[in-house]
Amino acid sequence: MASTLPAVKFVCSGCGATIHTVLEEVPAYDLMADRESDAQGFVEQAVECSECDRQLSVGIRNTGAGLVDALQDENTPVEVIDDPTQRPDDEWDTEAYQRENLPNDPGQIFKFATYDIDFIAGEVESGGHGSVAALNRMLLVQYFSAIEAYLSDRLIRLVLDNPKSLAALVIGNKEWAGEKISVVELASNAHAFRDWVHTRLRELMYHNFVKIDQYYRSALGSTIFPDEATKKVLMEFVPVRHDCVHRYGRDHDGRERTISKVDLDKLGSALENMVAHLEGLFVRRRTNG
């Protein structure tokens, strides 16, 4: 039976022999990290060619969508075999499901989600329950989950449906300037470039509004912020979200974050302004062709 251990395969640049070696360590991907650069795990593994004894070093990075391997200081293509991060937990192809089931109206879904949040917050506030503080922190995080889903679905839908937006996004993205897609992949998959961009967009952390704004500026030609006042409010809540997710509602000094219904209303209004602004841009875009 063939081995199912994760491995890499490449051709030795010294003698041309094929090297197939099992990975000693698979780097982890930190889903809780606030920055993509912090989330992606990276390890190096020393490899020796059995034919010419050449010493090589392979860099292994977990992008969250899969493992990416490359020889250090070499341009030799490296193939990942039995990537454990690509194995679905069940018979469903999760990536294909996400790609094929993008919502047609992300704005409407956002409205449904935030309506429920506001309703629950109002009910608990009026009831005087002792768990208001904890629940409000959870609702704040849920607000961020709703806007992250909206920004992600809107951007992905935009670039997958519009070749001009797809090209504009890639051309305007300095982070992707050095990325490569293999000729073999392009030849075997007519949608390889489109799929590559889709994968990169799914890796983003959409609560990083400043970074996501740059993506929208390239793809849509407009900022995600309707005005400076809305931007200021949203940026004020970003560190609050971080503490609610990563510090159980405590700040750096251990003090509990107090979040009131007024705070939730303030955040909700700012997010609704952002969504209304973007939805208006999409309506005008469809109208103008």
Image (cartoon, grey):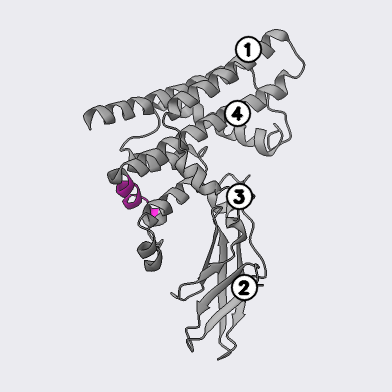
Callouts 4 and 1 close, C-beta under 8 Å: no
Placement of the N terminus among the 4 image quadrants: bottom right
Q: The disc labelled 2 sits on which kind of residue?
A: Gln
Residue 220 appears at what percent x and percent y? 32, 38
Mark closer to the chain start, 3 or 2:
2
User: Which residue is denoted by mark 2 in the rendering?
Assistant: 45
Spot occupied by residue 219 in the image (x, y as percentages of width and height) = 34, 42
Give the side of residue 129 with respect to residue 183, left or right: right
- Residue kind at label 4, given as amino acid type: Gln
Q: In which quarter of the view is residue 189 placed?
A: bottom left
Q: Is residue 31 above or below residue 251?
A: below
Whole-angstrom CA distance, mark 3 to mark 4, is 29 Å
Label 3 and label 1: CA atoms lie apart by 41 Å
- Disc 4 to disc 2, C-alpha distance: 40 Å
The label nearer to you, 3 versus 1, is: 3
State the separation of the CA atoms marked 1 and 2: 55 Å
Disc 3 to disc 4: CB gap under 8 Å: no
Tag of residue 122? 1
Q: CA distance from mark 4 to mark 1?
A: 15 Å
* Marks 3 & 1, CB-CB < 8 Å contact: no
Along the viewing direction, whichever of 191 and 69 lies nearer the viewer:
191
Residue holding disc 3: 91
Q: Which stretch appears magenta?
A: 166-174
Instruction: Determine if residue 271 is in view.
Output: no
Q: Hey, which quadrant is residue 129 in on the image?
A: top right
Specify which label sits upstream in the sequence, 4 or 2: 2
- Foreground mark, 3 or 2, reads 3
